[in-house]
Amino acid sequence: MRAAPAPPRLSVPAVFRTSDILPQVEKALAGERLTFEDGVRLFQSEDVNALGWAANAVRERLHGNVAYYLKNRHINYTNICKYDCMFCSFYRKEGQEGAWLWSVDQVLEHVAPYKDKGLSEFHIVGGVHPTLPFSYYTDMLRALKREHPGVAIKAFTAIEIAYLAELTGKSLGDVLKELKAAGLDMVPGGGAEVFADRVRYKVCRDKADADRWFEVHETAHALGIPTNATMLYGHIETVEERVDHILRLRDLQDRTGGLKSYIPLAYHPDFNRLAKLGAPSGLDALRNVAVGRLLLDNVPHIKAYWIMLGVKVAQLALSWGANDIDGTVTWERIYHMAGAETPEGLTEERLREVIREAGREPVERDAFYNVAGSEGARGNPS
């Protein structure tokens, strides 16, 4: 039997043959790994048309015309936080106006209307609460698994998990094992911000540093818990610091293979101490999606998080390297408390419409990127 023919190699359109990023585009199309210098050039180039075309070509080579979404529900169980990050509009101190903390029963009450509605995922993140016992987190996971056994739980950023290890005096491995036994299926990518020490010292010096973020994710991967990764861009970071951040994620994926997706997150300026900087532009959002797709040759999925980008920019991002738009969400507070004007949720029908309007084929997935309803969608394949 003859082997299937190799897919035709893409050639760069004539319009881009004089682009200042032609060497980077050609390397990406050939499947060659881009360097730090390549990443800087991509971010600095004014030829955004060539950048978008190249990222889309790689995206379509990997995923064709498909764009994924899922039915999920966000649970922001508390906004009380012991840290004081300059970019954060979400956090409050205990007793401060606008602070909240849900009991486990209130968490269950919050999601009760969605029982048997075909949800694939609970996405749970909150502030790093200074007084909650470790049992609160395991009790919440067990209760959700008991009441919603078919829903995957993606919960607690690396910053939250690092604090739980500090709180209990246990190793990260032991904390993650206990969380997994209680129902944790996946870890979200938040808390990464920008890994550069200079940036973290200025905007979030009190919380776990970059090395600790990586330690949490590597430990999770070793235990069979997949994770996502993010970068919060558009505040005080440099182009070089963005590229360093992305390549450190690529190195992590080389070591473990445990990252499911990368989500570039735009800084939102309202109601925080970096407000004078303003918000990054929609073009910067597209640039970050595209460069992420081209540099992260080993991370399968790039997410255009519509809550943060807005629906229209998220639609454009599906042709700039992104192949996922996230989900129904339903109730999200972190970005909305920072001034996001997007809806707090979209119906499945509207999500599918949004994807079709962008010229893509909507495909429902589960938390682990299995096509919903497929054999692999019955649980965490890792």
Image: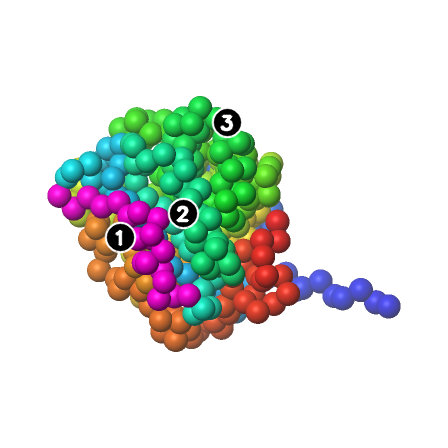
| Residue tagged 3 | 171
In-front residue for pair 50/330: 330
User: What amino acid is at disc 2?
Assistant: Met
Q: Is residue 100 on the magenta stretch? A: yes
Q: Residue at x 53, y 31 (%)?
A: 174
| Label 2 element class | helix
Q: Is residue 291 above or below residue 12?
A: above
| Label 1 element class | loop
C-alpha distance separating marks 3 and 2: 21 Å
| Residue tagged 1 | 333
Q: Are marks 1 and 2 in contact (CB under 8 Å)?
A: no
Callout 1 crowding tier (Cα within 10 Å): few <14, some 14–19, many ≥20: some
User: What amino acid is at disc 1?
Assistant: Arg
Between disc 3 and disc 2, whose residue precedes?
Answer: 2
Q: Residue at x 49, y 33 (%)?
A: 175
In-front residue for pair 372/54: 372
Tell me residue 44's x, y (percent): 37, 44
- Using the rendered image of the protein, determine whether residue 60 is visible from the camera's viewpoint: no
C-alpha distance separating marks 3 and 1: 31 Å
The quarter of the picture where residue 327 lies is bottom left
The magenta segment: 97-115
| Direction top: furthest residue | 169
Between disc 1 and disc 2, whose residue precedes?
Answer: 2
| Residue tagged 2 | 140
